[in-house]
Image (cartoon, rainbow, N blue to C red):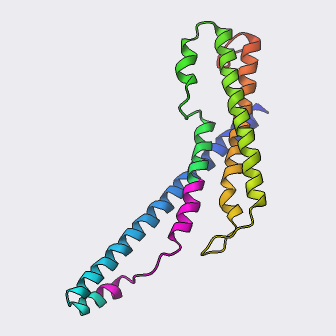
C-alpha cells in the first residue's frame, strides 16, 4: 500500500510540473506573438505615415496582422491555472516558504517542536479545506461565459478546487505524519 501511495505521489507531482511548464510555454508563446504582431503593425503604420505604402503593404502581406482580441481571455485562463497548479506542485514537495522553517529548528524539545509542526500542519489543512469548499462552490455555481470563446467560466475556476484538493490531501498526510511523530516521540523522518 505504501508503494502505491509513493507511486501516486510521484505521478501527481510529475503531472503538475508538466502542466505548469506547458502553461508557462503557452503564455510565453502568446506574449511573443502579441509583441510581434504589435511591432509589425507599428512598422506598417510608420511606413504608411511616411508615404511608403508599397512597403507597408509588403509588411502586411508577409506577416498578416490579425487581431488578438481573444488574447486577454486565454492569458487569464492560463495564468490562473499556472499559479494554482504551481502552488499545488510546490505544496506537494514542501517547496513553499513557511515561517515554520525558521522557528521549528530553534525549538530544542522534540515533543514541543513536533507539536508545533502538527499545529502548523493543522492550520494549513484547515485553510485548504475552507479554500476547497468555497472554490468548489464558486466553480459549481458559476453560470457566466467568457466574452470571446463563450467558454463556461467554471472551466476557468476549476483550477482552484482541483489544486486545493491536491493541497488538502498533502496537508492531511502531513498531519498524520506529524501526529505519529508526536505520539512516538521521534522524528517522522527517522527510521522506525
Q: Is residue 41 above or below residue 105?
A: below
**Left or right: where does residue 31 sit relative to residue 190?**
left
Q: Residue at x 44, y 60 (%)?
A: 28
Q: Residue at x 52, y 53 (%)?
A: 21
**Left or right: where does residue 48 sit relative to residue 30?**
left
Quadrant in which the N terminus is drawn: top right
34 or 133, nearer to the observer: 133
Q: How many marks can you see? A: 0
Range drawn in magenta: 58-81
Q: Does the magenta-highlighted stretch encompass residue 54?
A: no
20 or 138, nearer to the observer: 138
Q: Does the magenta-highlighted stretch encompass residue 76?
A: yes
Q: Residue at x 74, y 36 (%)?
A: 5
| Prevalent SS, magenta region | helix
- Residue 136: percent from left, percent from top: 75, 51
62 or 12, nearer to the observer: 62
- Residue 130: percent from left, percent from top: 74, 40
**Left or right: where does residue 153 sit relative to residue 79?**
right
Q: Residue furthest top?
A: 109
* Quadrant position of residue 184: top right
Amino acid at each position: 500500500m505504501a508503494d502505491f501511495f509513493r507511486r501516486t505521489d510521484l505521478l501527481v507531482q510529475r503531472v503538475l510540473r508538466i502542466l505548469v511548464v506547458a502553461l508557462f510555454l503557452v503564455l510565453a508563446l502568446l506574449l511573443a506573438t502579441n509583441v510581434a504582431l504589435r511591432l509589425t503593425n507599428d512598422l506598417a503604420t510608420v511606413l504608411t505615415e511616411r508615404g511608403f505604402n508599397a512597403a507597408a503593404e509588403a509588411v502586411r502581406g508577409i506577416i498578416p496582422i490579425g487581431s488578438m482580441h481573444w488574447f486577454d481571455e486565454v492569458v487569464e485562463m492560463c495564468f490562473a491555472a499556472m499559479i494554482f497548479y504551481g502552488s499545488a506542485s510546490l505544496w506537494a514537495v514542501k517547496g513553499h516558504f513557511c515561517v515554520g522553517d525558521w522557528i521549528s529548528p530553534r525549538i530544542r524539545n522534540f515533543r514541543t517542536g513536533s507539536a508545533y509542526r502538527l499545529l502548523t500542519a493543522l492550520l494549513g489543512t484547515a485553510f485548504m479545506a475552507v479554500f476547497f469548499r468555497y472554490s468548489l462552490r464558486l466553480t459549481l455555481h458559476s453560470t457566466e461565459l467568457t466574452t470571446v470563446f463563450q467558454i463556461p467560466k467554471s472551466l476557468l475556476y476549476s483550477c482552484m478546487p482541483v489544486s486545493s484538493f491536491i493541497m488538502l490531501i498533502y496537508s492531511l498526510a502531513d498531519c498524520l505524519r506529524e501526529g505519529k511523530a508526536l505520539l512516538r516521540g521521534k522524528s517522522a523522518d527517522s527510521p522506525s
